[in-house]
Image: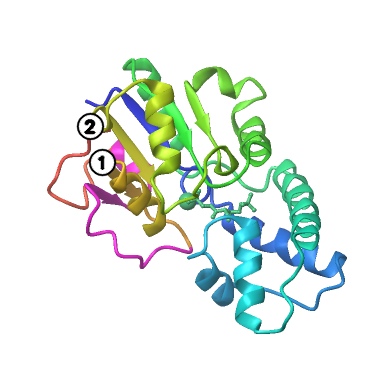
């Protein structure tokens, strides 16, 4: 049994990526840009982790010179983040099936909880305050966000920082992820990975994962997707 469970946020705890997409589109309109990302385009763009990085990558793809100044990217991202919080606060984005049960069961078993995500502390707080109450952070021993580390996923930085904060070895933990970039990040930190398939990454290659589930409610039952036992 793992000493700690390390959770990704977007796509893993809740299906937030559709709200991120809507928030980006809102920011583009507000900023006077004629960009709009439909689901197919967003699915492609999700290969680039981080909202600011994703916008830069999209702009580069349009091949219109000169590059968008950092100030524009920052302004767009501020509008996007504010709108994302508003969307989350409507309560329209609940935790995915099995997440709340797993958090409770893990605590009861004495496992420690942590978060390793690409998104920001503000976005994590918006989601988890809504879903778990404003004192949610008391249950987590480490919460590491994208801007806390040098390189975002698929680099291992966020996971290595989480291990350091927990003062645990990689083999003592399980990472719970929904994307191939997340799987690669955790694997590069040598942490075993449990995948919970989400909307945008359903058909990613997860062959390097220890366990692949459709959602975390399967941990409570017997509907296992691979022979290998979940460490969670
Ligand atoms: C999540 C992301 C994030 C969100 C947007 O990846 O890639 O970029 O889409 O968040 P993961 P920000 O689930 O692997 O952590 O706009 O706050 O960057
Ligand atoms: Mg994710």
Question: In front: 230, or 49?
Answer: 49
For residue 40, side relative to residue 213 (left or right) = right
Proximity of marks 1 and 2: CB atoms separated by less than 8 Å: yes
Magenta span:
200-220
Residue 151, image x and y in percent?
49, 49
Q: How far apart are marks 1 and 2 (CA)?
A: 7 Å
The numbered mark at residue 198 is: none
Residue 115, image x and y in percent?
48, 34
> Relative to 185, is 52 above or below?
below
Of mark 1 and mark 2, the one earlier in the sequence is 2
> Relative to 21, is 91 above or below?
above
Q: Residue at x 52, y 70 (%)?
A: 43
The residue that label 2 is drawn on is 171
Q: Is the magenta stretch mostly helix, strand or loop?
A: loop
Q: Label 2: few (<14), some or many (≥20) within 10 Å?
A: few
Name which quarter of the figure residue 30 lies in.
bottom right
Q: What element carries label 1?
A: loop
The residue that label 1 is drawn on is 190
């Amino acid at each position: 049994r793992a000493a700690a469970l390390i959770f990704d946020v977007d796509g893993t705890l809740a299906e937030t990526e559709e709200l991120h997409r809507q928030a980006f589109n809102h920011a583009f309109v507000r900023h006077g840009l004629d960009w709009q990302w439909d689901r197919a385009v967003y699915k492609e763009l999700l290969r680039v982790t981080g909202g600011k990085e994703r916008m830069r990558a999209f702009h580069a793809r349009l091949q219109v010179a000169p590059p968008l100044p950092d100030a524009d990217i920052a302004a767009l991202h501020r509008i996007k983040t504010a709108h994302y919080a508003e969307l989350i606060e409507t309560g329209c984005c609940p935790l995915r099936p099995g997440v709340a049960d797993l958090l409770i069961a893990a605590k009861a078993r004495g496992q420690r909880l942590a978060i390793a995500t690409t998104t920001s502390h503000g976005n994590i707080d918006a989601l988890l305050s809504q879903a778990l109450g404003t004192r949610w952070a008391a249950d987590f021993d480490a919460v590491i966000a994208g801007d806390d580390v040098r390189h975002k996923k698929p680099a291992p930085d966020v996971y290595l920082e989480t291990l350091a904060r927990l003062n645990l070895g990689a083999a003592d933990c399980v990472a719970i992820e929904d994307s191939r970039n997340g799987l690669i990040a955790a694997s590069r930190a040598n942490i075993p990975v449990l995948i919970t398939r989400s909307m945008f990454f359903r058909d990613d290659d997860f062959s390097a994962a220890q366990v692949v589930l459709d959602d975390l409610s399967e941990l409570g039952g017997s509907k296992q997707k691979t022979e290998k036992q979940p460490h969670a």
